[in-house]
Image: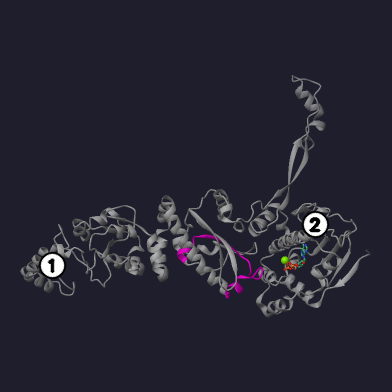
Amino acid sequence: EGSTETFRYESDISRLRSLVIHSIYSHKEVFLRELLSNANDALEKLRLTALTDRTVMSAGEGNVTIEVNLDEGSAGKTGKIIIRDTGIGMNKDELTRNLGIIARSGTGEFLKKAEEGKGVDGNLIGQFGLGFYSCFLVSPTVRVSSLPPATSSNPNPIQYTFVSSATGDSFEIYPDPRGNTLGRGTEIVLTIEEDQGEFLSVNKLKDLIEKHSTFSTTFPIYIKERKTTKVPIPAPQSPVADGDDDEFENDLDSDDQTPKEDEFETEVDEKWVKVNDKAPIWMREPKEVSDEEYIEFYKAVSKDPAAEPLGWSQFKGDTGSGVSFRAIMYIPSQLPKDFWQKMTSGINNVRLMVKRVFITDDLGEEFMPRWLSFLKVTVDADDLPLNVSRETLQNHRFLSQLQRILVRKALDLFTRVAADEPKKFEEISKLYGNALRIGLLESEKDKIKLAKLLRFESTRSNYTSLEEYVDNRKEGQKQIYYIASVGETPKDLARSPFVEKLLARGYEVLLLNLPSDEPMMAALDHFMGMTTHDVSKKGLKYGDEDEHEAEKKELEAQKVAFKPLTDWLKKDLTGQISDVVLTNRLVTSPCTIVVDSMGWSANMQRIMAAQAD
Ligand code: ADP
Ligand code: MG
């Protein structure tokens, strides 16, 4: 024991603190995340210590919790934020070393980066393990009191206090004059001045905890809520019952009885509310998590309490560069509003955490492929340096490896829902069918997997897949027939002259009307041994030509007979058409215009013309 001791910050720490404090800093709010993450660490250390030393838990404080308490000043503009944990605590020496003197390994490098003009942002601070100093972002003076647990080697610990201002180059340590008030653990008191007044709101703090620390801290966080209610003071019994002289009474005694202020009392109702009452479900085994819990979690991450996901999957992974992670992925029940305009709304759809600490939900527009950017994903990586910034992440192989794994898992998820929950998959097809088609266009490698996920209308069915189409093919049929025209109804498409002959012969034709359909079918080119064929293009082959040998002979004969007509048409329409041929493709229509098999179909020409506008 003893009195106050004053220590000088090591010069690096001094520089560092002034840098942090004087930077124009856009993420001051990270202080809470950093302090809560330290509290969580302290509780984890306590748990580890308790494994080998039972006295740790049995002596004193039994709880393992984190508490956040707001203590507003009289004017409501200044006040204190008090963060308390019942973790491992720090003795005098640890307070001095951990918070004060000793520059930690990252400090020098951090200073170099920061002074090179890279700017000091919240992530940079976190990345270098300098989280504690972020409290000076919002608080000009910080007081930390701490009491380690009683252990067999130190049965009578003493509570010490560390005090530092943001600006001075020294700090003080002294035995807490209040004695061992903590039971065990650490209490951090931040003084909040008017300029940081926004943090003096229980709701603001709750929002921040929810954003950065819910689902991330493994220990419960409580915040103290205060409700002030005005309760009326029971009126003194009137000596006179209801009657005519009421008016008289009021006139007489108005000074004593009517002033509104005096009729009410202010009652303050305080209670501790658990903020992170949902455990991080991705840390649990999937079979131990109920559907309700998955849905609850989805509601929390999607900020849409009414929505239910159309599917989800939880998985563990390893990126190959030694970073293992756990993740949960959801298919939302709605497309983001501006999905088709931007197709980048995914920027906030992947939340990256490291060891349960929220790092960022902005991995950049490029992170997920555009066509999958609607998925809501939470990734918790284990072995990344804690609090890496997005800038450093982008150069990290982890991200590109993670992206590949997420794409594969997304395809697995769609495939599983398609097989196990066909009704759900119908909804998915309606919402995301176009996106999946674009996926097929943009990812050569996964073409076939994606093709299996597509659903179409056809002349046979209003909901069919390519696999079904292939199953239903006619003997000898080598082509998957389709007609594509944006925006036309399948009914109209079925009436097209191109479809007639095929229908008459009993072939199925896919009736496609999405903008992505035609380029997608062209890109797919073949599926399960069949080639895709646009029936409005030349080169249509029936598989049953042999059966129609007679027909063929007749066609040859007719070709000769009609030569004068076709020659005349060719001559008359020179420059407008490239060829005139006799065909057996039509049943009732007398003639049709077809596109060269290498040319753009009329539909595609319409799309191109629209894009040129
Ligand atoms: P990091 O958490 O990356 O080590 P910080 O600057 O956040 O860096 O914290 C510095 C150190 O101070 C921690 O490593 C820990 O030893 C100690 N510390 C900070 N907060 C607490 C706390 N609430 N309980 C116990 N020790 C703490
Ligand atoms: Mg920390």
Q: Position of residue 129 (x, y in %)?
A: 71, 70
Please tell me which residue lies in front, 95 or 249. Answer: 95
Front one among 239 and 371? 371
Q: Which residue type does callout 2 highlight? A: Arg
For this view, does 476 lie left or right of residue 256?
left
Q: Say above or below: 300 vs 441.
A: above
- Which residue is denoted by mark 2 in the rendering? 54
User: Going by the picture, which residue comes out furthest to the right?
Assistant: 2
Q: Quadrant of the C terminus?
A: bottom left
Task: Measure the C-alpha gap from mark 2 to mark 1.
Answer: 94 Å
Label 2 near ligand 1 (CB < 8 Å): no
Residue 338 in view:
no
Label 1 near label 2: C-beta < 8 Å?
no
Quarter assignment of residue 143: bottom right
> How far across and down, in percent of the image, does residue 504 sit?
18, 56
Estimate how packed mark 1 is, as few (under 14), some (14 to 19) or many (20 or more) residues with alpha carbons within 10 Å: some
Span of residues in magenta = 370-396
Q: Quadrant of residue 371?
A: bottom left
Question: Which labelled disc corresponds to residue 582?
Answer: 1
The quarter holding residue 191 reads bottom right
Count of labels shown? Answer: 2
> Earlier along the polypeptide chain: callout 2 or callout 1?
2
Q: Position of residue 332 (x, y in %)?
A: 50, 55
Q: Quadrant of ligand 2?
A: bottom right
Task: Let me know if residue 238 is in the magenta part.
Answer: no
Find residue 120 and report its horizontal and vertical position in percent: 68, 72
Q: Secondary structure at mark 1?
A: loop
Give the crowd class for mark 2: few <14, some 14-19, many >=20 residues within 10 Å: few
Instruction: Specify how the rendered protein is coloured.
Output: one colour
The amino acid on which the numbered mark 1 sits, given as a three-letter code, is: Leu
Nearer to us in this view, 1 or 516: 1
